[in-house]
Amino acid sequence: MSYYITTFCHGSKYEPIKNKWLERIHKKCKNYNVKIYENINTPVHFTYAWWDVVRLTNNLSLLLETQKPIIQLDIDAIIEKDIKCLVDLNYDFIISTEIGGDKAFPPECSKKLGFGVCSGFYIIKPSAYTFLCKILSFMNMRINNSYSDQVNIMTYIVNNNYEIKTEDIVFDNITYTNKIIHIDGITICVLDFDIVTRDPIVNKGQFINHINIDNVGGVDKFLLYFDEPLESLPLTCRCGKIHLGDTNVCKHMELRNR
Ligand SMILES: [Zn+2]
């Protein structure tokens, strides 16, 4: 076993996804172990992003115990290709990119960085233990008024000395551009948006499709994205979903015709 894939699954809403999520990992990946954090009694308050604290606490314990790379993969993230080559990337902490570019949540940080990080997928190597313990302590204290790992990671980066550069990498003949951040003596890799992709999702050789369950109309509709070809299913963007607070006219349809 060379690494652990973990997720957080709380409440009956996501229960039906679990088996398909596991089955998909089994189909695509090798030499991994899975751990699902569920039925959690949390020491923190049930306010926004408390689950980030629970999963990072558990992931750091698992890391300490096993000294293996620990992956956090959201239950709404569907693996399309074996992620081994991402785990093998020689960085201490690897994380996916958030939707929204320089307006990504939280905007006061992404404005400075030019992008946001998305904790729907991250990989912690043993060498990032100390750095993430520090982030976890800020999360626990809600030092940035939030339990959110994204908020605390990004706020920490922009408020401390860091260097940032881009680095190209080729997987399956596709060139990707990752952002590399040096901070606190460690190296963080923020993966190209097309490696772990989000809304609207089209097939581009990506490793993971991270789909917003509400955008596609709930768990039952989301489950179709495991089984049906992407092109036959509705786009995963939030555009025009007034009940979700979005009134934009969808400009993504043309992606389908390329
Ligand atoms: Zn759209």
Image: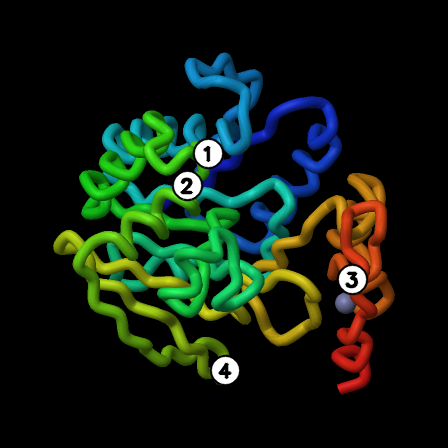
Give the residue at x 45% y 38%: 148
Badge 1 marks a residue whose secondary structure is helix
Q: Nearer the viewer, residue 9 or 84?
A: 9
Q: Nearer the viewer, residue 172 or 52?
A: 52
Question: Quick check: is the Cβ at mark 3 less than 8 Å away from ligand 1?
Answer: yes
Q: Amino acid at mark 1?
A: Asp
Point out which mark residue 52 bears.
1
Q: Position of residue 16 (x, y in %)?
A: 75, 32
Q: Does any portion of residue 5 appear in the rendered image? A: yes
Looking at the image, tell me whether mark 1 or mark 3 is earlier in sequence order: 1
Q: Quadrant of the N terminus?
A: top left
Q: CA distance from mark 1 to mark 2?
A: 6 Å
Q: Which residue is labeled 3 in the image?
A: 239
Looking at the image, tell me whether mark 3 or mark 4 is earlier in sequence order: 4
Q: Which residue is labeled 2 in the image?
A: 149
Looking at the image, tell me whether mark 1 or mark 4 is earlier in sequence order: 1
Please rate how many residues cluster around mark 1, counting C-alpha atoms within 10 Å: few if below 14, some from 14 to 19, many from 20. many
Badge 2 marks a residue whose secondary structure is helix
Q: Amino acid at mark 4?
A: Ile
Residue 217 vertical placement versus 186 (above, below) = above
